[in-house]
Amino acid sequence: MLDAMRRGAVNWLAKILLGLLIVAFALWGVADVFRNYGRGTLARLGNTEISVDEYRQAYQEEMASITRRLGGRRLTAEQAKMLGVEQRTLSRLIGTAAIDSHARELRLALSDKGIAEIIRTDPAFQDATGRFSGDTFRSLLRQNGISEARYLASRCKEEVRDQLTDTLLAGVSPPQLLIDLLHRHREETRVIEFFTPDYDKLIKIAEPDETRLREFYDQSKRQFMTPELRKVNALLLTRADVKARLPVSEEETKAAYEQDKEKFNIAEKRRVLQLSFPDKAAAEKAYAELAKAPKFVEAATKLGLKESDIDLGVLARKDMIDAKVADVAFGLKKDELSKPVEGQFKVVLVRVSDIVPGKQRTYEEVKNEIRDRLAEERASQEIQTLHEKVESERSAGKSLKEIGESLKLPFNEIAETDRAGKTGAGKPAIEHAEAAKVAEAAFAGATGIEAEATDLGDGGYVWVDVLGITPEKQKSFEEVKDEVKAGAVEADRRKEITALASKLVERLAKGETLESLVKETSAKLEKTPAVTRSTSPPGLPQNAVQQAFTLPKGGATSAPTVDGKARIILRVAEITPAPPPTAEQTERLKNELARELQSDVLGEYVAGLQTRYGLSVNDAALKEALGSGVREQPEYE
């Protein structure tokens, strides 16, 4: 929240600091000390406590930030867990608490005059004339639901934290040798020749006899089992159901539109061509030639600049990193070339080849979007409220059916389901979008044990009680004889394909030509353009490219096709070492490596502070904060 309000007010290092914190803490994690510390306290670092409410707020802010970066697509709880959002949020809170504790120990502080000056010069709080606006300041605080005193205190901590970490990371820079090695690794190219033999013509699999079928059946018995089935009751709390019971009025929708009308604007976008130069003199010389050229791109190419290198794409003003260059780009007419601009990083010429006008969207155009957003916001809170009510009812001994009737939530009696959410006959066990999650919860529980709620993909929950279990059973050979035959034939075919591919590779290694083997195997010889390690050329899987980069020139090998049913024969035809890096490539690699090194340094620093001050985490409180419905009382130290 604070980061969004202070955009543009700090230097480049401070801007990437949050990203560094996230990466470092995700890599280093938090200390392996999980203890219950008291209800309401989620973690303690020295004398600093992190509350459950603080964690919930930070988690929601992290999720909202990810949603914005994904263009409004909301992550499910499971996806968030897979991406490490839960642990990353906790690590970030612990990390900032550690840095704050160190700053206090060092007696670092910011004067009232200093923080006042920082806020006065913050572009986020300035009006159209570039002056500080008290009304804008207070309006932004209201929109973010934060008091002035709380904002000032938080901003002071952030500024001190930035100064401390800026000092720590200021001298971190990658050595030139590392930059050169990474460049050579990434930019080396290879040309790969490959073909896929017509295995259907080359390999004939004999009809397996009874002995072979029995052998395959005995080796693959796990393939021929009736699945375990479970009888369960399920109580569903889904986002769709909750949104349906939380209608948003027309008046509320209109009020939200009026409050944030500017946010619904479609920003003007421009296709920006940017030409970079080492100094102003070189830029002025190029400007003199390009300004009078009838064909701009052709003239730029003669100066050694590729169109793909200078075309930044279609961008809104906010998408451009350098504010000074952005101001120039959005002040140009179509096809107008700017004079040399001394940007934040280098001297450039800017040209706009296309302009996509912006637009103020009307209420009618955005009302459904607003209504859905308001419903989403309310649904998140209502889901948590209903979750707590269900847990309370469960603790009181009520059945899922009784709770469903009481809270008007969908209750389902499922006679049987396998792990895939199917009945024994292969039909859906429950007609619901979350059927797979219900099945997952069913097989995570046990009869007679009240299981915790399982997160659904939409942010909701499902409670599942296991009533009965029908164990899996081995199918007899006679029941599955046709399936056994198909499996045996396919296994034998793949074995023969692998053997044939190995022989072809051996023949290439002994000097036979690729063309002769292509003709012999009724294949088609294909050849990639020069590719790097990260390229996926048509017809050649990425794993095959990776294998090719382990071979010398003329080296051959085989690799599975995309579907895994055949093998490709490939040979390295050409190897071209990476050319010397350009200034731009060197700068880009230097910045990338610097960020990684800074991340490592920051991670070590925070890990050291955790050890120094002592860290304990209340595992039960963490589950509670994440809505896991912990019913047991924590033990207190």
Image: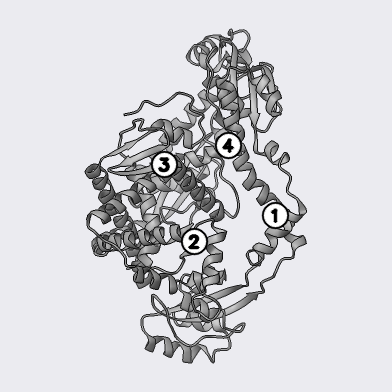
Q: CA distance from mark 2 to mark 1?
A: 22 Å
Q: Please report contact status of discs 2 and 4: CB closer than 8 Å, yes or no.
A: no
User: Between marks 4 and 3, how big is the CA–CA gap?
Assistant: 18 Å
- Secondary structure at badge 4 equals helix
Of mark 2 and mark 1, the one earlier in the sequence is 2
Secondary structure category for the residue under label 2: helix
**Does 354 sit left or right of 615 as displayed?**
right
Q: Amino acid at mark 2?
A: Ala
Mark 4 highlights which residue?
Answer: 384
Q: Around disc 2, counting alpha carbons within 10 Å, would you say few (fewer than 14), some (14 to 19), or many (20 or more)?
A: few
Q: Residues within 10 Å of mark 1 (few under 14, many from 20)?
A: some
Counting from the top left corner in percent of width and height, residue 137 is at 51, 68
Q: Amino acid at mark 4?
A: Gln
Mark 2 vs mark 1: in front? 2
Q: Is residue 133 left or right of residue 612?
A: right
Say which of 197 and 215 sits in front.
215
Q: Is residue 68 above or below residue 235?
A: below
- Which residue carries the number 2 mark? 4
Residue at 50% across, 57% down: 146
> For residue 635, which quarter of the picture?
top left
In screen coordinates, is 472 left or right of 533? right
Q: Secondary structure at mark 3?
A: strand
Q: Secondary structure beneath disc 1?
A: helix
State how far apart marks 3 and 2 are (Cα): 23 Å
